[in-house]
Image (cartoon, rainbow, N blue to C red):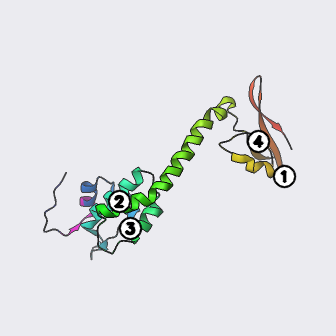
Amino acid sequence: MPQIPEKIHELTVGQLSARSGAAVSALHFYESKGLISSRRTTGNQRRYQRDALRRVAFVRAAQRVGIPLATIRDALAELPEERTPTREDWSRLSEAWRSELDERIKQLGRLRDHLTDCIGCGCLSLETCVLSNPDDVFGEERSGSRLMVERGSGRPKRMRREMAPEGCVEVEGA
């Protein structure tokens, strides 16, 4: 890993990329989302303060555990400008994110448990599929896995998939 002398207080995008392990395109994306900031030189080149290294590490760690970028941005916005996230910041935020992550884990467990129900026929029927149509919310509007347009008429025709001896087939349905 390239070392940057302490006397250098600003980093180029290439230096930040090399030190953080994040691609240059990722750094530009983080900047466009307000996760890190830079100033522009007279030659229109980006220059990042050294604290951007810790901010990028913070963002990447939060992403690895599944925290959305918008949530990370909101968390970083609570910190004073030019201050890097500390261990205490991470501890406080990770505690706040724990319930959200626990809920996602439960939701993924439910999806995993119902996955074989769906793959059993392979049709993803909206009438019965617990993955595509939990609690049959689409049943109030229509039946079938998709709404198709009749050729030439421009009117929607209700179609659904059913298992037949020759495999999953589409049939017209109400």
| Residue 12 is inside the magenta segment | yes
Q: Considering only order in the chain, which callout, 3 or 2, is on the residue closer to the N terminus?
A: 3
Whether residues under marks 4 and 2 lie with C-beta atoms below 8 angstroms apart, the answer is: no
Disc 4 crowd rating (10 Å Cα; few below 14, some 14-19, many 20+) is many
Residue type, mark 1 in image: Arg
The answer to whether mark 4 and mark 1 are in CB contact below 8 A is no
* Label 1 secondary element: loop
Residue 167: where, in percent of width, then height?
A: 73, 26
Decide which of tag 4 and tag 1 comes sooner along the chain. Answer: 4
Residue beneath disc 2: 91
* Residue 110 position by quadrant: top right
Q: Residue at x 26, y 59 (%)?
A: 14
Q: Residue placed at 74% from the left, 46% from the top?
A: 136
Q: CA distance from mark 3 to mark 1?
A: 50 Å
Q: Is residue 61 magenta?
A: no
Q: Which mark is residue 155?
A: 1
- Decide: marks 3, 4 in contact (CB < 8 A)? no
Residue mark closest to the camera, 1 vs 2 = 2
Q: CA distance from mark 4 to mark 2?
A: 44 Å
Sequence-earlier tag: 3 or 1 = 3
Amino acid type at image mark 2: Ser
Q: Nearer the viewer, residue 9 or 84?
A: 84
Quarter of image, res 52: bottom left
Q: In the rendered image, which residue does mark 3 sit on?
A: 76
Q: Which residues are magenta?
A: 9-15
Task: Look at mark 4 in the image and give the residue it sits on.
Answer: 127
Identified by mark 3, the residue type is Leu
